[in-house]
Image (spheres, rainbow, N blue to C red):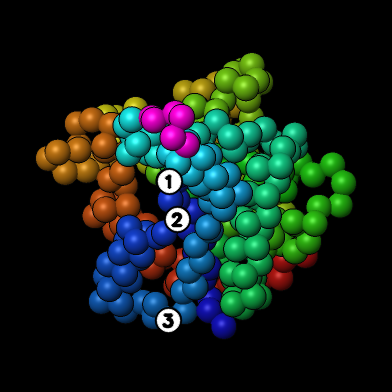
Amino acid sequence: MENLGVLVIRGSGGTGFDRQQKFIDKMNRRLAKKGVDVQLIAYEFIDWYEPMQSQQDILLDRMFNNPNIGLKSKILRKLLMGNIADLINYGGKPNLPGQTYERTHLLVHNAVTKLQSRLVENAPLIVLASSMGTEIINNFIWDRQNARVDDPFGTTPFERFETLVGLFTFGNNIPIFSSFITIDDLRPIQFPIPGTSEPHKSMAVWENIYDKNDPLGYPIKFLNEYYAAANVKDIQVGVGNIISFWNILSHFGYWTSRKIRNRVGDFIAEVMQVDFSKNHIV
């Protein structure tokens, strides 16, 4: 059984976690050099794409194989369908689930329970979320905090994220989704999570990392007075390379950033020094 769980949720596009795995591999090598036993860290990837991707694949197949249409720009259409369409079709309206919203959250829950099964009791949790994954995990946690009836996705403290000690959001999309209600009525998740006990509570860190050149990733404390008062830090970090750092392509640079990787790794090293087994969360 491992002592720390790390939940990873990336943004839209096709399936696969190549960049995220490289991020973890490099981070683990640095952690090992610092004396951290990385074998005691369990990582779980949230593959949330199937509900939308299966429908997008059907649509693309019908478009491209219909001789009466003859559409051009197939590569661009596929790119837009696999990215922009996700933002539209997810339907991320907390407590007002559509089919895609509900099916997506079921996949999140499955990953959470799978990770939980690998961990010791009271193990701390860290979440790494990027792009649209920030919106999905935000809504998932919100729904656990605001369940109106018995919550099938929140039957244990771990499933309710009450052992969450670190929330790292990269290239945050929340402002893109925020106009579905009056901006000044928008509320952030409660963090630390209600029900969190020591030592988890005193360690709790939420860092929202964005690049000022990234038009798809945002700070969030500016949204309204509730976000301004929230326990979250907006941190500007330059990401990308000479081709991408100054434009929209910087949005794809968070998982290759050494600064971010080291920032997360240093926090993991700090968490691994704490004995969480003495605390009993009920």
Mark 2, residue position: 15
Q: Residues within 10 Å of mark 1 (few under 14, many from 20)?
A: some
Which residue matches tag 1? 13
Residue sitting at 61 percent across and 49 percent down? 51
Which is more toward the observer, 202 or 134? Answer: 134
Residue designated by label 3 = 39
Q: Amino acid at mark 1?
A: Gly
Image: 214 above or below 117:
above
Q: Position of residue 257 (x, y in %)?
A: 26, 51
What's the distance in space between the residues labelled 1 and 2, CA to CA? 7 Å
Residue type at mark 3 is Gln
Q: Which mark sits nearer the N-terminus, 2 or 3?
A: 2
Q: Which region shows up in magenta? A: 66-71
Q: Which quadrant holds residue 229? A: top right
Pointer 3 local density, CA inside 10 Å: few below 14, some 14–19, many at least 20:
few
Q: CA distance from mark 3 to mark 1?
A: 30 Å
